[in-house]
Every structure is written in structure tokens, then in C-alpha cells.
Image (spheres, rainbow, N blue to C red):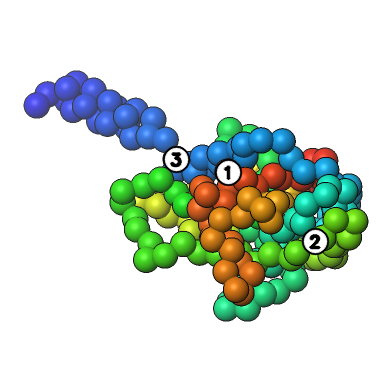
Amino acid sequence: MTRTKRLFAGGLAALLGGCSAAPAEPADPPASGAPPAVGFTADVRVEGQSVHISYQLTNQSPDELLVLNRVPAGGKTDPNAVYIVGRSGTHVVEIGKRAFAMPDTDKVSWAQAFRVGVTKVPPGQSVGEQLTVPLPLKRNHPYGDDYGDGAISLPDPIEQIVFCLGVVRASEAKGLAADETLPHLSSTTSVQHLFCSNPVDL
């Protein structure tokens, strides 16, 4: 091979390698149907090396609601535990207490679906929390960071953050167990409605 051909081949390989897409966040399918009537407020503030979040949700509907706010952490539930994912195609990161669908891949399998705990909120009742999330933010998805195509990273740079809370009507919940948890599956996300704060600059 001549020097010119070697240079062309090397440049083509580098070009093709540079065009490979980075692993992306799995699809986040929207819920079907109308969201329940709620009063939702959330305050998100960045102070020093932490993100401070306070929220309150009041059930204004005639149905009992399940708020998906008990995120497992090391085998237990920590009030400060949250899921952290990027929003594909943006520089926005979502901090959330919610359900996710199981990633659609044939490269990785899980013995069973991971689960998130719920708080039951009867009509007219409220639930709220104050939590602190340390900076820098680290991705935290119930199914991990790698679904067979490489590790998924948060956007770089992160320009904005938003807090989202998942809510499901108790009558529409699928697979609610005695321990009051729901699975991270599309059967849950199809009836989950997200209530989110306004984006905040990081």
C-alpha cells in the first residue's frame, strides 16, 4: 500500500470512528390518558455543592393516588435518594422520583424488574419532602448505565436541571405488591404521569 493510500485509509477509519453515536438514554414513553388533578409545587435551588429540592403534591382528584417517591438506595429507602438521567438531545438533567421502562435491548437481560416504592395519597391529602442531592451529579437509573452499547453519560456540560415526580392512580396500578412498590416496566410508565418543576440553571 502506498503512503497516499495508507493516509486515506487511516483518515477514513478515523472519520468513521468519530461518527459512531454515543450510547443514548433509553426511550421514555409518555403516559396515556389525562393526568389526575393535583396541586404540585417544587422549589429547586443550587447552593454550593448541593441541589436542594422541596416539593409538595396535593391530591385534588376523587381517586387515591400513588406517589412514586421511595427510591431504593443500598437495599433501603433513603429520602434523599433520587434517579438522575439526561434528557436526550439536550443539556438538561432530570432529577426524579418516578418509574422507568425496562430498556429495550437484546444485549442485556435482568432476572426481574427493579421496583420503586410508593406513598398512598387519598383524595384531599398531601405529601411532600425536602431533599439534598450532592454535586457533581451522577447518573442513576434503576437498570444501570450500560445496556450493551457502552456506558451512558449525563450531558456535558449540564446547563439546566429539573425535578420530576411520578404519580399513578391506584385504580390503574399494575403489579402493586404487599410491600407497596411498583415495577420499573412499561406497564407502570404507561399510567404514570410526571409533574415537574421549572428548569433551573446549574
Q: Residues within 10 Å of mark 2 (few under 14, many from 20)?
A: many
Q: Residues within 10 Å of mark 3 (few under 14, many from 20)?
A: few
Q: CA distance from mark 1 to mark 3?
A: 27 Å
**Residue 79, position in %: x, y?**
75, 71
Q: Which label's residue is closer to the chain start, 1 or 3?
A: 3
Q: Amino acid at mark 1?
A: Ser
Residue placed most toward the observer, 32 or 89: 32
Q: Amino acid at mark 2?
A: Val
Q: CA distance from mark 3 to mark 2?
A: 40 Å
- Above or below, 16 relative to 81: above
Q: SS for tag 3?
A: loop
- Please name the residue that numbered disc 1 is placed on: 190
Q: Residue at x 52, y 49 (%)?
A: 187
**Residue 80, position in %: x, y?**
74, 68
Q: How many marks?
A: 3
Q: Residue at x 51, y 40 (%)?
A: 27
| Residue 199 appears in the picture as rendered | yes
Q: CA distance from mark 1 to mark 2?
A: 20 Å
- Please name the residue that numbered disc 2 is placed on: 121
Displayed quadrant of residue 29: top right
Could you say which disc has been placed on residue 22 in the image?
3
Q: Give the quadrant of the N terminus.
A: top left
Displayed quadrant of residue 47: bottom right
Q: Which label's residue is closer to the chain start, 1 or 2?
A: 2
**Residue 133, position in %: x, y?**
75, 63
Residue placed most toward the observer, 56 or 187: 187
